[in-house]
Image (spheres, grey):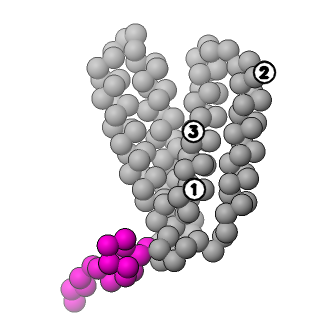
Amino acid sequence: MSNIIPWLFLSCSIVLEVAGTVIMKASQAAWPVPGMAAMYLLLGLSYWCLARAVTRVPVGVAYAVWEGAGLALITLAGALMGERLTPSRMAALAAIFCGVLMVHHGTRHDAPRHARDGVTASSGRPAQADRKVTP
């Protein structure tokens, strides 16, 4: 997996989380049951993408980016749906952004071997070695 692929999975995870949450909010009045089903599907896919991302991105960084970006985008989506974006909320979003940057820059860029090489927790060997190759 190239270095950009885990970040693409993380980006997809964020978009899916935001979409699921926005659908949950928007669907409550008109069609709550299909809206909730769509929300669960999107959030499930979001977690699947997040799980793929943490194979190469340190989990602390991935989770900070996922939560921070998701929270910021959901807050902005709420503002587009008529919720007030107060100065205290804007300050909180700025603090979240700063926190995500601090976690990212405070993390060593040479990730632990198990995150970098895809080592399985059970065997300690690279995940690719667990797969049987047929000619």
Choose between 134 and 84: the one closer to the eye. 84
Is residue 6 highlighted in magenta?
no
- Residue extending farthest to the left is 134
User: Which badge, 3 or 1, comes first in the chain's sequence?
Assistant: 1
Assign the magenta stretch its main secondary structure.
Answer: loop
Is residue 120 highlighted in magenta?
yes
Quarter occupied by the C terminus: bottom left
Choose between 78 and 54: the one closer to the eye. 54
Q: Is residue 128 visible?
A: no
The numbered dot on residue 47 is none
Choose between 51 and 123: the one closer to the eye. 123
Q: Position of residue 26 (x, y in %)?
A: 46, 18
Q: Is residue 82 visible?
A: yes
User: As shown in the figure, which amino acid type bears the numbered disc 3?
Assistant: Gly
Residue position for label 2: 87
The numbered dot on residue 70 is 3
Q: Left or right? Give the position of 76 relative to 37.
A: right
- The kind of secondary structure element at disc 3 is helix
User: As shown in the figure, which amino acid type bears the numbered disc 1?
Assistant: Gly
Q: Give the range drawn in magenta.
A: 118-135
The numbered dot on residue 60 is 1
Q: Position of residue 56 (x, y in %)?
A: 51, 67
- Whether tag 2 and tag 1 are in contact, CB under 8 A, the answer is no
